[in-house]
Image (spheres, grey):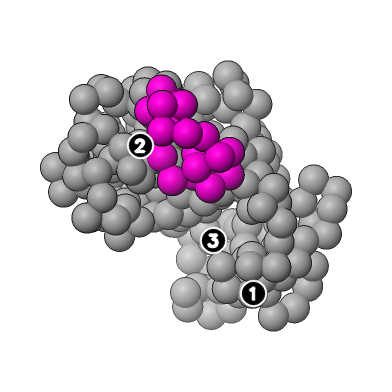
Amino acid sequence: GIHPAATGDIVFDGKALERAARKRTRDQLREMQIVFQYADTALNPAKPIEDIISRPLAFYHGLDRQARSKRVDELLDMVRLPRSLRYRHPSELSGGQKQRVNFARALAAGPKLIICDEITSALDTVVASAVIELLKELQRELGLSYIFISHDLSVVEAICDEIMVMYNGERVEQITPDKVKSPTHPYSKLLFSSVPKLDPTWLDGLVRDPELVSQYGHR
């Protein structure tokens, strides 16, 4: 809804949504939050972490200053960040810490669904793994749903219950993680077979069907 949809319908929790976010109710806005790919550009550099996380608490829930302060501490605890970070600015945090702040801000709204847009792509492997484990833990505790957008198939397998393969803006296949090794659509086959392996002979065994590559390999 940030950019209004040109075509199609958006149905969430059984209800049709307006294509543009500005036309939706405050509850509809609250229930669907997003965590962006680049934490650096998603956080206001002029604001301390306390103010960043507090904004949804005031906007969606109308909490007073004292209640907001208490909830900020709780949210920092939830994303495994020290409470002392509330007084710092984004530039004083690491990439992983900033992404956790982004997630805390999303949680502050009290959402049902969080859209995670390539949230680990700018993080190193160890930090990304810790963020994924945190997301899985919060999902269990809070009953959250995620739409997890990623090109990293190992991350997709680690967190997703269902995997939707998209090509040119259209769904070409929907599978479960246990079926990743046996996709049926040509583009899915090319996509999954192209994942690098820690094997010096990996490229030698990669099957590159000329017709498959010409049809789906230009992206």
Q: Amino acid at mark 1?
A: Pro
Residue position marked by numbered label 1 in the rendering? 4
| Disc on the earlier residue, 1 or 3 | 1
Task: Report the span colored magenta.
Answer: 54-71
Q: Nearer the viewer, mark 1 or mark 3?
A: 1
| Mark 2 nearby-residue class (10 Å; few <14, some 14–19, many ≥20) | many
Task: Please give the name of the residue rendered at 84% of the width and 53% of the height, measured from the top-left corner.
Answer: 15
Give the amino acid at mark 2.
Arg
Please report contact status of discs 3 and 2: CB closer than 8 Å, yes or no.
no
| Distance CA(mark 3)–CA(mark 2) | 33 Å
Mark 3 / mark 2, whichever is N-terminal: 2
**Residue 44 pos. (x, y %):** 29, 56
Observer-nearest of 27 and 168: 27
Residue 60 x/y as whole percent: 58, 44
Q: Is residue 64 magenta?
A: yes
Q: Is residue 79 left or right of residue 62?
A: left
Q: Amino acid at mark 3?
A: Leu
- The image position of residue 168, as x and y in percent, is 61, 74
**Please, what secondary structure does the residue beneath circle 2 have?**
helix
Q: Quadrant of residue 120?
A: top left
Residue 57 in the image: x percent, y percent? 50, 39
Helix, strand or loop: magenta stretch: helix
- Looking at this view, is 144 or 106 the one in front? 106
In this view, 173 is above or below 80: below
Calculate the distance from the C-alpha at mark 1 to the C-alpha at mark 3. 32 Å
Q: CA distance from mark 2 to mark 1?
A: 28 Å
* N-term mark: 2 or 1: 1
Q: Which residue position holds label 2?
A: 100
Which residue is under mark 3? 190
